[in-house]
Amino acid sequence: MEGTHKPMESAREPAPGIDIDQLAAQISQLASNQPLIVVPVTPISQKGWGYLVLLDHNQLSAAEFCALAASAGARLLYVQTENFSMGTDPDIIVGACDPSGPQASMSDELADFRRYMENFNGRIRQLELAFVTGCVLHCWSVAADWYVGIVDRAAELFPHIQD
């Protein structure tokens, strides 16, 4: 019975799989063959509020985000900046620390850190852009490098008061 084909055995063989890594690498090329711009995230549902796309500078540059808005037919680009104030910044808990409190042993380090932060008071710490098209809100944001450094340093200096 040499050469006899056994249909049941071939039915059990797995179908050739899709190489997801290769397909993902090809998406930009596939989209460029069409009039499409690749947005590197998918919309999330906002339960009755429509859909939201959250992007940052690691996914698209500000120029690419503006090009996306234009190609999507958006007529309005929303822009918001947030300034830094060391005494009221929600991400810098040490701005409200009492130097005579539990951190008293770190008072010199806290004083140095506060002097450092004072250099950035009033500067823009975050830029946010947004547009709406087809009932989908697209948001893009970037934080200043110096601000990320301040937040990281505050978390290192005061891990017990950070959430």
Image (cartoon, rainbow, N blue to C red):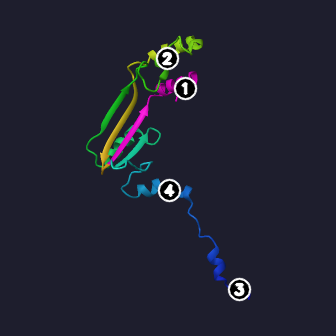
Identified at 30% across, 45% down, the residue is 132
Q: Nearer the viewer, residue 135 or 77?
A: 135
Q: Amino acid at mark 2?
A: Cys
How far across and how far down the image is residue 60, in percent?
43, 42
Q: Amino acid at mark 1?
A: Ala
Identified at 44% across, 48% down, the residue is 41
Local packing at callout 1 (Cα closer than 10 Å; few below 14, some 14-19, many 20+) is some
**Cβ–Cβ under 8 Å for marks 1 and 3:** no
For the N terminus, which image quadrant? bottom right
Mark 4 vs 2, N-terminal side: 4
Label 4: element kind: helix
Q: Is residue 30 above or below residue 126?
A: below
How far across and how far down the image is residue 94, in percent?
49, 20
Question: How far apart are labels 3 and 4 at the CA level?
Answer: 40 Å
Segment colored magenta: 136-163
> Looking at the rendered structure, which numbered label has been put on residue 97?
2
The residue labelled by disc 3 is 3
Question: How far apart are labels 2 and 1 at the CA level?
Answer: 13 Å
The residue labelled by disc 1 is 155
Which quadrant of the figure has residue 11? bottom right
Question: How far apart are labels 1 and 4 at the CA level?
Answer: 40 Å
Label 1: element kind: helix
106 in magenta? no
Label 3: element kind: loop
